[in-house]
Amino acid sequence: MAARTFTIDGKLVTAEENATVLDAATEAGIDIPTLCHLEGVYDVGACRLCLVEVTGIGKLLPACTTRVAEGMEIKTDSERLRKYRRMTIELLFAERNHVCAVCVANSHCELQALACRLGMDHVRYDYTFPRWSVDNTHTLFGMDHNRCILCTRCVRVCWHIEGAGTKNVSGRGSHSHIISDLNQSWGSSETCTRCGKCVMGCPTGALFAKGVTVSEMERDRTKLEFIVTAREKKQWIA
Amino acid sequence: MVIDDLMEIAAKEKAARKPWVVRCCMAAGCMSSNSRGVKEALDRAVKEAGMESEVEVRGVGCMKLCCQGPLVQIDNEKPGATVEVTSVDHSPLYEKVTPEDAASLIGTLKGGKTSVESADPNQPFFTGQMSIVLANSGIVDPERIESYISLDGYDGLHHVLREMTPKEVLDTMIKSGLRGRGGAGYPTGLKWATVAKTPSAQKYVICNADEGDPGAFMDRSVLESDPHSVLEGMAIGAYAVGANQGFIYVRAEYPLAISRLHTAIKQAKQLGLLGSGIFESPFNFNIDLRIGAGAFVCGEETALMASVEGKRGTPRPRPPFPAESGLYNSPTLINNVETFANVAPIIRKGAEWFASIGTEKSKGTKVFALAGKITNTGLIEVPMGTPLRRIVEEMGGGAPDGGTIKAVQTGGPSGGCIPAHALDTPVDYESLSKLGSIMGSGGMIVMDEGTRMVDVARFFMEFCMDESCGKCIPCRAGTVQMHHMLTKILAGKATIRDLEQLEELCDMVRNTSLCGLGQTAPNPVMSTLRFFRQEYLDLLQEDTLGPGATNPPQKTVPAAN
Amino acid sequence: MDRLKFATVWLGGCAGCHMSFMDLDEFLIDIADHIELVYSPVIDVKEYPHGVDVCLIEGAVCNEDNLEILHKIRRRTRVLVAFGDCAITGNVPAIRNQLGLKNGESVLQRAYLEGAQSNPGIPREPGIVPALLPRVMPVQEAVHIEYYLPGCPPPADRIKAVLAQLLAGTEPRLTGAQLKFG
């Protein structure tokens, strides 16, 4: 496979021709913030946090779905990008009811960690305080829509790693929400294999194992990584 | 089917023509005011007058002056006369015809008088028009393929299949200068050439008929009035790029357009104008309909293709562009209805002819749907570069009841408001975008002095908020916040801080959203802020609790100990 | 040397932030020479004074009293610091907003009728319980705030970091893990 040479933040980087900008940056030790990206499932370019500047291209491009090209000059960090990223996170916090203090994922939450990293000391938008429900019908897991950021990791994990196809998105705009099967309670789903991979993939406290309380929801991603490595590299590394 | 068959159908159709043709509009606008009843009454009146052998009552498509419907016009054609419309005597265009008027209208054929109001065909609304896309609209019977064939229909397709290589078709399209009529204005020939040069055993052609802008009804009229022109354009496109399957994605809210497309496709298949070995060439092409379920975002091409595939209609990042990897990951040519309707005329009359119309960078004509505070609501087709003032004041007749035009909104929720002082702008892609608006698909909403621009901005923001698919954060959550801020401003509860925040958010949503819906959602706000900022400022309240609100004001930096 | 006129206020919150403030322990003694505490739940001053330099605000804006005093504080104070998650996000007090327009009435019923062990009844006499706002707000929705000190509660070392910077006359800047909510 042909190699491509380009720069990321001024650093000369080489990567395989069909690598994404995100892959290449990660390889080069440059950390681009992401939320909808999850190693092992295809990317959707939805959260817009990984947007980067590419010299000569007027639009900002999502690092997760943009392929590298010879001679590309990529900038992953600028005042403008920092501003947009912070605004994106603020919009998420204002959109649903993210109450860190009483959340199972407190201190183990990717949204919370990103907010810290991006310097969000408060949200400048009026909170919308929508009313969302909690689905506690499943015997092992729960789903709190108040904490969902619609990254669709659970959907992609469910379809493409587990192959069950239980999770999906229904509704549109701010009414979009994750559903089970034909918009029924999770507990009544006949396709759910109770594998828990959606819970492992969730970046926030939206999906959680039952029985955990505030700050106790730590995620074990090793199971996902194990399957992904087995699939992509044909290696069984425990 | 060979060319002789086509000519025979045309000849038969012409020979069967009766001396009088009473054309009655059967497009959705007139049908909503009972033009079907009018047509039935006309049929009865002809029968009662015993003139069945001399008079044909023909249901036709849009006759353009929609606000005065149902519309009826009578042509006096001598048997054997040529088909050019100009050689025919037209009656005035009768307006607001009711079934009760039928007898008196038919009576005029024998020299009687009628009291039915009529529009002067020499008024600017009609004389200012130049018809390419709408040339057959109001003349052809959209439910009979023979009617289209008698007006040189499918001639272009025959010419292309028998006498041109795909490369020559591409060159013709590039030379014509046609640009996409869906809004963005990408050069059609270049798009076709990209699809053509992408190697693949399977390629697709899609016609985007998911017209969703509030106030826009151009594509609907074309589909209802002259569906075969779209089918022919698609087939020519398919030949040029090497596709064998087409889809028309039409919204479910257009039942009449759907039914006419069904009929048209069926008739074209029966005559072998769609299917295998068209015109005894090796070219195969089929068209299927896909009905959209009412999501505005499905007009975005990647969302549309997801929907055709049976998936949730959400956009995906581009590249890859559909021309390289589109429907079912195959190279896909996707154009708008009006773009395809331009194709057959370009082939028939030549690229030079088309390129001679319009401006340097915007060739041909554009169809606009005039709506809002304007005297003549309806469809117009004008050469590119026609000044906006000519369209709204001369042709449109200005604001009704002596009002003054304040602004013209183009491009729907993705567009902007052009203020009255800029009405001399020629309508072309570049001039409109310089003013912060866009050509868009052709909706043109006229506003008078009674319109509050902040209301307009909020209306479109609400539309975008409701229609956001919810996939990317800036559009999903950003439109909600922008709508909230506009509501706050309108309620008189906002301060200058809110306005600054609104502008910052507009910039962010425009630059970070995934697809065109989000990227253009701030346009109505930004354009009204640009030209009508004072209307926003007048609604703000004083910021008594903002920075520097401390009374009495003191040092601004924390004191050192 | 002028001492910094310093205040703390307790709006709709659990007092946990003030508890955390008390956890500053000996640092309180260190700063005692540099500040003059002019208003706080921990001292007996009835009226919020004029000309205050810095005020830490704990709690969300839940009722009419909260809003009134917050406006007064803004007019009389140079630097406002939103102190803790309730002030900055609404946090737990704002959960009632999710109940919709009648949320105030619902929580009163829950607290004073359903939860009452004796003498159920909602105290409606003027001056007893201030009327609840229809929507709990974070403080920055009501007034301009200079600095933010998140946490539920903010740990003492974080409070110390902000106070030290304020006293040193620099702009308080929290970064990384110190910006954590919850």
Image (cartoon, coloured by chain):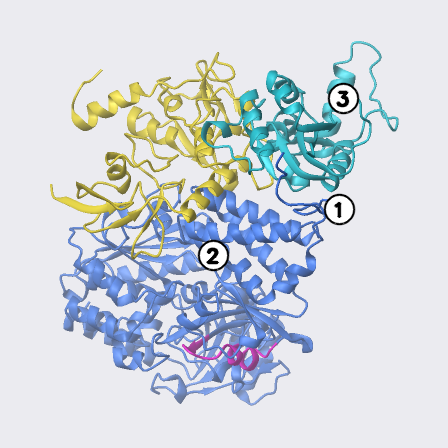
Q: Nearer the viewer, residue C82 or A94?
A: C82
Among the chains pictured, the one given blue colouring is B
Q: How far across and down, in percent of the image, does residue B441 sit?
A: 43, 64
The stretch in magenta equals B381-398
Return the residue at label 1.
Answer: B552
Chain C's colour? cyan
Dot 1 or dot 2, earlier in sequence: 2
Chain A's colour? yellow
Query: Could you classify mark 2 by the number of other residues whose Cα lies within 10 Å: few (under 14), some (14-19), or many (20 or more)?
Result: many
Q: Nearer the viewer, residue B516 or B296?
A: B516
Magenta stretch: includes residue B329? no
Return the residue at label 2.
Answer: B212
Gap in angstroms between the C-alphas marked 1 and 2:
55 Å
Quadrant assignment, res B146: bottom left
Which residue is located at x 52 percent, y 17 percent?
A214
Q: Amino acid at mark 1?
A: Pro
Return the residue at label 3.
Answer: C43
Are tags 1 and 3 found on a single chain?
A: no
Disc 3 is attached to a residue of which chain?
C
Q: Amino acid at mark 2?
A: Gly
Q: Is residue B242 above or below residue B19?
A: above
